[in-house]
Image (cartoon, helix red, strand yellow):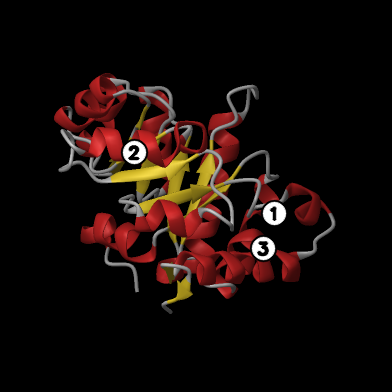
Amino acid sequence: MVIKMDIVSFIKENKIVAISRHVKPEKMVDVAKALAAGGIKLLEITFDQSSSSCISDTAFAISSVKEAMGNLICVGAGTVLTVEQAEAAHEAGADFALSPDTNVAVINAVKRLGIVSVPGAFTPSEILTAWNAGADIVKLFPAGVLGMPYMKAIRGPISHVPLMAVGGVDENNVSTFLNGGFCSCGIGSNLVRNDLIEKDDYSQITAIAAAFVEASRKKDGKNNG
């Protein structure tokens, strides 16, 4: 069960955030069910900034999944770039809000609305700016480009900020990120595959989700699940 008052702990416990981009709103419930069947309990539904209907589309998708799934899955809004989008996410029932950037105004709005804040950061200054503004977790983005040597370097002076790895995370490196100090990982097209969704091949989405969950539990090259 998702405990509403402790979404941060739920994210840290379940670790894998499935990121849906460019998925048709009417398909999101089926996607959420397929992911949940594979053991994924965290879903990010992103705002498509290129679409003029992104606010209504994403709000509809979030509210539909929340209504259909209840506490079986924790739903976040992704690519939250404006205060208006943060407010729409809150109205739709989002449990957390993620952004690719460090925008203090958005962080403040998300916290004011009572949603868990996961802004994106690239540099040590951005990480600490986000954290000091009230972020609950900071998304290191793009983690795959920065890599583990970067992570280890910043962990020396910045050991107190929980970090989520997003960008370039796949089945082969997810355990490396989690064992290397990240509290969670966000995974997009390697997990929420639009080609399979377009064909309504949800069983394959479930299989990929299960593989990611298994991979995330590996420690030192051995399955720890």
Which residue is pictured at 53% across the width and 67% down the height? Answer: 215
175 relative to 134, above or below: below
Disc 1 designates what residue? 27
Between marks 3 and 1, how big is the CA–CA gap? Answer: 6 Å
Disc 3 designates what residue? 30
Which corner quadrant of the image does residue 224 belong to?
bottom left
**In the displayed image of the protein, which residue is found farthest to the right?**
199
> Quick check: marks 3 and 1 in contact, CB under 8 Å?
yes
Which corner quadrant of the image does residue 74 belong to?
bottom left
Between marks 2 and 1, how big is the CA–CA gap? Answer: 36 Å
Q: Quadrant of the N terminus?
A: bottom left
Which corner quadrant of the image does residue 115 belong to?
top left
Camera-side residue of 90 and 104: 104
Is residue 213 among what the camera can see? Answer: yes
Within-10-Å neighbours for mark 1: few <14, some 14–19, many 20+: some
Disc 2 designates what residue? 151
215 relative to 178, above or below: below
Is label 2 or label 1 in front?
2
Left or right placement of residue 220 versus residue 34 in this view: left
